[in-house]
Amino acid sequence: MVQETYQPALIVHGGAWAIPDNQVAGHLSAVSNAAQIGWQVLQQGGSALDAVEQAIVALEDHPAVNAGRGATLTRDGKAELDALIMDGRNLGLGCTANIRTVRNPIRLARAIMERTPHTLIVGPAADELAAQFGLEIVPPEYFITEAMRNEWQAHQQGGSDTVGCAARDGAGNLAAGTSTGGMTGKWSGRVGDCPLVGSGGYADNYSAAVSATGWGETLMKVVISKTACDFSAAGLAAQAAAEKAIEYLTQRVNGSGGLILVDRFGNFGAAHNTPRMAQARVYPDGRIEAFC
Ligand code: ASP
């Protein structure tokens, strides 16, 4: 039997909001670097799931965006992190929330998917589980950058650069992942859309892979990522599916945010109703285009 091959595709985002001019360069560098890392995985024959994980690890390690190091802080000045990963082959799902010591929450999300009988594990028990799984543990202060401490001290609301990735690999499988520190000044214990299936992300080989970002309290009400996948499954082109989901977010709950999408044919879509969304996509010839 001849194994069919597919053109790989990968798109990443670094948050949707009014990204100030002086932060654009940092965002472009973060998303371009992550796109490059994810693309290398696909080029070497790796799975969409591996590419999504690696791209998001790079974003979590990058201090310019709100995931891992550089996360936004809660009302009491702490970092509490959420992540989700989903495998479009079999709807495999791993999610985590309220993480305080795991350097790369996306790795924990994947470990939950692959190494536990569960899909969502949160709080101190999830931090402990990560240690048992041999994931890198860091002190809570590791996540707090000076920029985020200043933002928190100024009581600025809501600048948020959640990160995410959607990909299709050479076997035609889709995957998506999302990772965040949440919204600045959030209540301790608050969980947004990011680790909720269908809200922060969704992937299904029958439709599309999607990662979302923005005001989580509104994104989750319209289950934004699954909504975009459903539009894709119904026959909309990738860009139209992304736009229609954001249109619904705006009209139905006056929400704000953005999403990236790769459909089952390997086409990209991206839409946002915020002033900016940082994103980078890789074209078949390996060229990376970053926007903000
Ligand atoms: N969606 C994230 C949350 O509400 C924040 C963001 O995307 O910037 O936690």
Image (cartoon, rainbow, N blue to C red):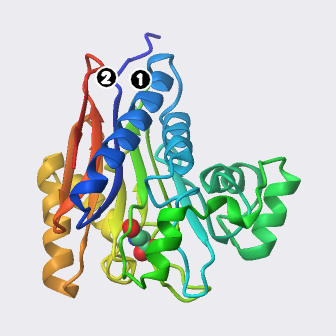
Residue 278 appears at what percent x and percent y?
Answer: 28, 51
- In the displayed image of the protein, which residue is found farthest to the top? 2
Residue, disc 2? 7
Q: Amino acid at mark 1?
A: Gly
Q: Could you tell me if the residues under marks 2 and 1 are in contact, i.e. CB atoms within 8 Å?
A: yes
Q: Is residue 111 above or below residue 224?
A: above
Residue at image location 84% in from the left, 47% down from the top: 134
Q: Which element type, helix, strand or loop, lies under badge 1?
A: loop
> Foreground: 254 or 169?
254
Quick one: label 2 or label 1, which is nearer the N terminus?
2
Asked which quadrant contains residue 8, the reply is: top left
Indicate the position of residue 289 as horizontal and vertical percent values: 23, 33
Q: Is residue 94 left or right of residue 249?
A: right
Q: Is mark 1 within 8 Å of ligand 1?
A: no
Quick check: 115 left or right of 11?
right
Q: Which residue is mark 1?
A: 170
Which residue is at the front of the view, 233 or 99?
Answer: 99
Residue 283: x, y in percent? Answer: 25, 26
Q: Quadrant of residue 242?
A: bottom left
| Camera-side residue of 198 and 137 | 137
Residue type indicated by callout 2:
Gln
Q: Residue at x 13, y 47 (%)?
A: 237
Q: Left or right of 192: which side holds 113?
A: right
